[in-house]
Amino acid sequence: MKSQFTITSIVWLLLFCLVNHDTAGAQTVKDTLYHFQSNGNPIITHKFTADPAAMVENDTLWLYTGHDFEGGQKGYKLKDWCVFSTVDMKNWIEYPVPLKLSDFKWDKSGGAYAGQTIKRNGKYYWYISTNGSGIGVAVADRPQGPFKDALGKQLLTNADCFASTHSWTCIDPSVFIDDDGQAWLFWGNGVCYYAKLKENMIEIDGAIKKIDFDGLKFEEAPWIHKRKGKYYLSYATSFPEKIAYAMADHIEGPYQYKGILNEIAGNSNTNHQAIIDFKGKSYFIYHNGAIQRNGTSYSRSVCIDLLAYNRDGSIKKIVMTSDGVKIQEKKK
């Protein structure tokens, strides 16, 4: 009898611990969601964010950013990435840290540089770059992650950047899936590279090429989007950086330079943009150094302003504002 009671007690104790462990885990995840409202630009003021990329799924805009760890910095200090979501451009949710530089065991750089996330075949692929080690890809089952290294090695390294000599050339990946289902990856610093991706999204398909056209002056931060059959390549130009853009009838060009989209953003030497449509409006997402007192070129902040097109398809120059964008009401 004593032995039976002991075994029964142990079984119940294990079940109790298991149930309470699951409940505690769920509660922890819930508690680490941070709800906040944007009150103009910058939209995030409780931490320093940079290098924004965005995607839209159903009625939600997902924002992926880098994370400058401190205010008043005099150099880059980025160890992880952030993810946020909104359904109305006013009320935001920040999720637990979805991806850290330490998740990529191959990295030797110590710098969590820019990236972009896209959905394919029910998975979310986050292409990231580091300060000199190359471009990697992480994968998750949910847009908020957590993400894990999909390859265990770099997708691209400086050796793939055939027209460059400096160590930070293999950065700033931007991914785009065309209407025919073909996925493309653009990246680079000093030279704009691009290549096809295989269906599995973790392998380069074919030759690596580069974009050249009159007036390019490419610095970094390529972003591809498509509208009414036209391809738009926007990118950071010169230094301190402004954002310029070009247009083409085909994704591989030839591209025609169209001019500057926005001027130097606040007190930030760098800029990095995402262009996205959400609930009937177009948005230009970028960073500056505008958090009061502690904002710098190395302590940056993500902002959002409206983007508009001319009748000929060209883009009107961005008006950077402190007011930001208004709340988006749900469509009935």
Image: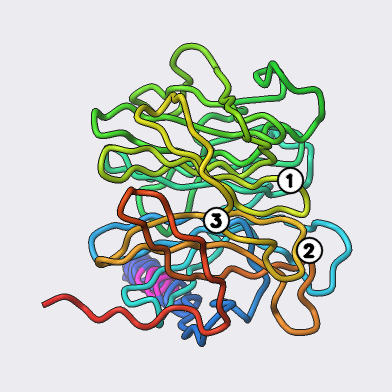
166 on left or right of 126: right
Above or below for 248 versus 50: above
Label 3 CA crowd tier, 10 Å (few <14, some 14–19, many 20+): some
Q: Are marks 1 and 2 in contact (CB under 8 Å)?
A: no
Q: Are marks 1 and 3 in contact (CB under 8 Å)?
A: no
Residue with the mark numbered 2: 297
**Residue 145 appears in the picture as rendered:** no
State the SS at label 1. loop
Above or below for 296 versus 125: below
Query: Which badge, 3 or 2, comes first in the chain's sequence?
Result: 3
Q: Quadrant of residue 168?
A: top right
Query: Which badge, 1 or 3, comes first in the chain's sequence?
Result: 1
119 on left or right of 332: right
The single residue placed furthest to the left in the displayed view is 332
Q: Residue shown at 72%/24% (left/top)?
A: 158
Residue with the mark numbered 3: 261
**Was residue 191 drawn as part of the magenta stretch in this picture?**
no
**Was residue 25 drawn as part of the magenta stretch in this picture?**
yes
Name the kind of residue labelled 2 in the image: Ser
- Count the marks: how many? 3
110 or 116: which is nearer to us?
Answer: 116
Q: Which residues are magenta?
A: 19-26
